[in-house]
């Protein structure tokens, strides 16, 4: 789907229309089978073929639509969902992520927030007995959160969400002990910000764990779509000015990673396995925090609305949010989880009366500022002319073998006319969270990260598993250069005795990639490209990809080939994109030069 767009005339209407579209999509998948109490009232998932326990969260946006439109179908759908939630309700007050009492209970914090907002804004849609029953269930959930959650409960997004949840529950239920606990956790939360850029860290277990290089666990997707929302809404409600000042700096630093089309560049994050171009697969969305903080920085509102426009373009004709930009062109069904999760903040935006007027302030990455470096994640951003890029050597592992982009790789490449051209995937696609991911389509795992690789004794080695790569930078008024020294490792981090260098040189007109190895290897460059693009090999050393906004021309010092895959495009669920898999041989001790130009 095309990513070029113009600002909509009414952002408020965009929020309302998209929310209604999503709610219609969810209602159409609600299971109506009174004879089967384990399924009746739940939301079916076309992408996963099962019920997601958190679908109960959709009660909140459905109740909002019931009040906004006066249509009974939304109210009936919300009530049926609440009745179904008994299938994931536990005696200790928790809800589980699946209809299995032994499955993950941490999601209780998100269910409690959704139910509290439903009762706060729309509880008048329930009769007295129903409201009492729903409130009693909220009390049980609130007590579970109070007794079990702190900032080390799990990944940091749970602790930060608990700060807001306890504050919300304290106000809704009139419980001062919840409010006090919320304030205690908020004071502790102030240490979970990196230096110097104040990125939220702790998106791993344990939250304080460091990488071999001493780097903390940072995940952009969860930070902007979950953690920062809770802390911002808490800080505003409490008027905690010290915390608000810190959050303003943090939001600004995270915003450096938003692309001009509203996409989030989480090519490097610790939970990149849940990255989709617009955000993260099962979190809520960036809109609440960024809209709420717009008085401090108008670009925050630009971020919220640009991302919302992208979400609209990634919404299927059936009213569900695709978890990527090319799901439709690859013929894949969307998972419903992304729709019910991202519908909640839209309901809150409308209920809270957030200012949705279109701002005039551009995003930071819209400017050609040169180079910005983030040493706490060993990552550099490049912006020159129409090019935007990310080069990373971040070495934090969420789990052994769960490998996001590293090794000095070009983890993101974006062009002003053509949109995203490269976007990193996992080095090996894995179902780290089987309930929240789907298998690789076509029974094919082809990484989308540009890379050096070499097969040796039947084992593949690549710089994608090099946790020790170094990156040096240089810039002039007309060029930006990144020099990478790297090794080839297998997925067990065993190293081949091969010395490798990569060089990325950006100018206004082109990107030149140089690759040099002491033994023959291959350089693989997957170019993001939906099936609607035309691809032609105009010469042995030249390939042209024609896109809606122009043509990308790749010219190489050695022959270029398009690697054979099962379909005309390879597809990776991280970040949900199709690609043309281009490669070239890198002869021993003879540099490959590959030039990218746009016409």
Image (cartoon, grey):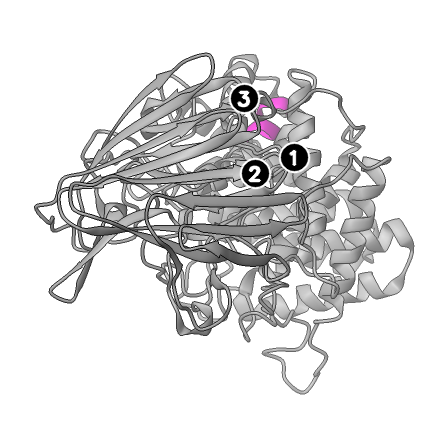
Report the residue at 48% width, 52% height from top.
543
Q: Is residue 219 left or right of residue 520?
A: right
Q: Quadrant of residue 215?
A: top left
Distance from disc 2 to disc 1, alpha carbons, whole Å, reads: 37 Å
**Quadrant of image for the C terminus:** top right
Q: Main secondary structure of the magenta part?
A: helix
Nearer the observer, 289 or 564? 564
Report the residue at 67% width, 68% height from top.
83
Magenta-drawn segment: 231-236
Q: Which numbered circle lies on residue 288? A: 1
Q: Is residue 382 left or right of residue 49?
A: left
Nearer the observer, 36 or 205? 205
Mark 2 sits on what residue? 598
Q: Position of residue 480 (x, y in %)?
A: 41, 22
Q: Position of residue 204 (x, y in %)?
A: 33, 43
The answer to whether residue 166 shows anywhere in this view is no
The answer to whether residue 482 shows anywhere in this view is yes
Mark 3 sits on what residue? 252
């Amino acid at each position: 789907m095309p990513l070029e767009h113009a600002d909509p005339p009414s952002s408020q209407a965009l929020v309302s229309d998209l929310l209604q579209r999503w709610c219609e999509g969810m209602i159409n998948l609600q299971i109506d089978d009174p004879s089967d109490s384990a399924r009746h009232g739940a939301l079916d998932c076309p992408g996963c073929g099962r019920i997601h326990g958190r679908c109960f969260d959709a009660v909140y946006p459905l109740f909002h639509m019931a009040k906004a439109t006066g249509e009974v179908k939304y109210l009936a759908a919300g009530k049926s969902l609440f009745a179904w939630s008994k299938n994931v309700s536990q005696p200790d007050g928790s809800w589980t992520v699946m209809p299995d009492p032994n499955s993950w209970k941490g999601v209780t914090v998100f269910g409690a927030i959704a139910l509290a907002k439903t009762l706060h804004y729309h509880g008048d849609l329930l009769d007295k007995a129903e409201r009492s029953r729903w409130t009693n269930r909220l009390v049980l959930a609130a007590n579970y959160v109070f007794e079990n959650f702190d900032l080390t409960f799990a990944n940091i997004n749970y602790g930060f969400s608990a700060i807001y949840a306890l504050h919300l529950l304290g106000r809704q239920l009139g419980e001062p002990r919840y409010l006090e606990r919320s304030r205690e956790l908020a004071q502790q939360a102030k240490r979970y910000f990196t230096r110097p850029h104040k990125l939220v860290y702790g998106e791993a277990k344990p939250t304080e764990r460091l990488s071999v290089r001493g780097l903390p666990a940072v995940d952009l997707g969860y930070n902007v779509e979950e953690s920062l929302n809770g802390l911002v809404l808490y800080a505003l409600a409490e008027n905690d000015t010290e915390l608000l000042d810190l959050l303003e700096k943090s939001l600004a630093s995270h915003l450096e990673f938003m692309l001009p089309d509203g996409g989030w560049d989480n090519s490097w994050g610790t939970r990149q396995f849940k990255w989709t171009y617009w955000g993260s697969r099962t979190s809520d969305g960036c809109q609440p925090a960024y809209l709420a903080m717009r008085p401090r920085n108008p670009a925050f509102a630009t971020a919220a609305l640009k991302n919302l426009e992208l979400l609209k373009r990634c919404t299927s004709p059936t009213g569900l949010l695709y978890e990527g930009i090319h799901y439709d062109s690859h013929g894949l069904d969307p998972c419903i989880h992304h729709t019910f999760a991202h519908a909640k903040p839209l309901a809150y935006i409308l209920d809270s009366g957030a200012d949705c007027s279109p701002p005039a302030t551009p995003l930071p990455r819209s400017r050609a500022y040169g180079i910005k470096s983030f040493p706490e994640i060993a990552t550099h951003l490049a912006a020159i002319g129409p090019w935007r890029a990310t080069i990373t050597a971040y070495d934090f592992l969420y789990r052994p073998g769960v490998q996001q982009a590293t090794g000095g790789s070009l983890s993101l490449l974006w062009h002003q006319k053509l949109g995203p051209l490269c976007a990193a995937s996992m080095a090996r696609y894995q179902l780290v969270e089987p309930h929240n991911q789907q298998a690789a389509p076509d029974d094919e795992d082809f990484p989308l990260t540009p890379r050096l690789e070499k097969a040796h004794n039947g084992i593949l080695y690549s710089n994608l598993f090099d946790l020790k790569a170094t990156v040096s930078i240089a810039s002039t008024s007309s060029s930006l250069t990144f020099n990478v020294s790297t090794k080839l490792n297998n997925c067990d981090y065993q190293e081949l005795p091969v010395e490798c260098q990569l060089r990325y040189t950006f100018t206004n007109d082109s990107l030149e990639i140089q690759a040099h190895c002491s033994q023959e290897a291959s350089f693989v460059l997957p170019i993001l490209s939906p099936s609607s693009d035309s691809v032609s090999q105009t010469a042995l050393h030249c390939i042209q990809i024609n896109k809606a906004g122009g043509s990308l021309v790749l010219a190489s010092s050695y022959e270029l080939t398009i690697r054979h895959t099962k379909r005309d495009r390879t597809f990776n669920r991280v970040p949900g994109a199709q690609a043309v898999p281009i490669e070239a041989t890198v002869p021993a001790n003879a540099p490959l030069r590959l030039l990218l130009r746009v016409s």
